[in-house]
Image (cartoon, helix red, strand yellow):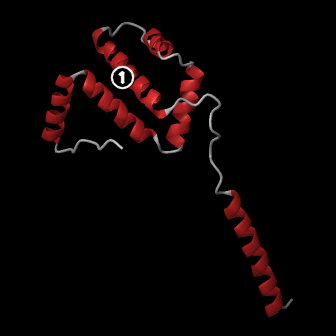
Amino acid sequence: MEINHQQIIKLMKKLLFIFVLLGLFSCGDYIDKPKNLIDKDKMAEIIADLAINDQAIFIYPDKNMEAGTRAVLKSHKVKPDDFVGSFKYYVIKEEMDGITNDAQEILLKKDPKADKYVKERLKQNGVAMPVVR
């Protein structure tokens, strides 16, 4: 069986067409935008409050912190499913770094002593303070 030049060109055209189609369809989003997406600023506030709540485990090591997490979400009038969906969306969209940096800024504004402590620790470790976008 002999393959001639024209058959090779036809095969290459078909393969090129398939790759173009694959390229077009692969450009879509990996995740759909959640129905009740929490905006970035509110998400940063929630994460800051959750970080404060997480520190309570050092004070009360034998306690269940789930109630504290629920209280934080309730204080922001956010359902747990909406928070989880928004969190996943922002992680996949690679926007979580900016949100967590904003949350860190919120925490540091709430406690100026923490700001000084964090800067000293980062300086000791030779790490630069993250830039908030």
35 displayed left or right of 87 = right
**Quarter assignment of residue 13:** bottom right
Identify residue for label 1: 51
Residue shown at 46%/9% (left/top)? 67
State left or right for residue 71 relative to residue 13.
Answer: left
As helix, strand or loop, the secondary structure at mark 1 comes to helix
The three-letter code of the residue at mark 1 reads Ala
Residue 110, horizontal then vertical, whole percent: 27, 21
Quadrant position of residue 111: top left
The picture places residue 34, in percent across and down from the top left corner, at 63, 33
Q: Quadrant of the N terminus?
A: bottom right
- Determine the residue positioned at 17% across, 23% down: 113
Looking at the image, is 129 positioned above or below residue 3? above
- Front position in the image: 12 or 73: 73
Residue 3 visible (yes or no): no
Q: In which quarter of the image is residue 84?
A: top right
* Count of numbered tags: 1
Mark 1 crowdedness (10 Å alpha carbons): few <14, some 14-19, many ≥20: some
- Quadrant in which the C terminus appears: top left
What residue appears at the point 83 percent right and 87 percent down from the top-left corner? 7
Determine whether, in the image, residue 67 is placed left or right of residue 128.
right
Residue 39 location, x and y as percent?
51, 32
Q: Which residue ends up furthest to the right in the rendered image?
A: 1
Say if residue 91 shows up in the picture: yes
Q: Name the residue located 14 percent from the left edge and 40 percent from the top edge.
A: 123
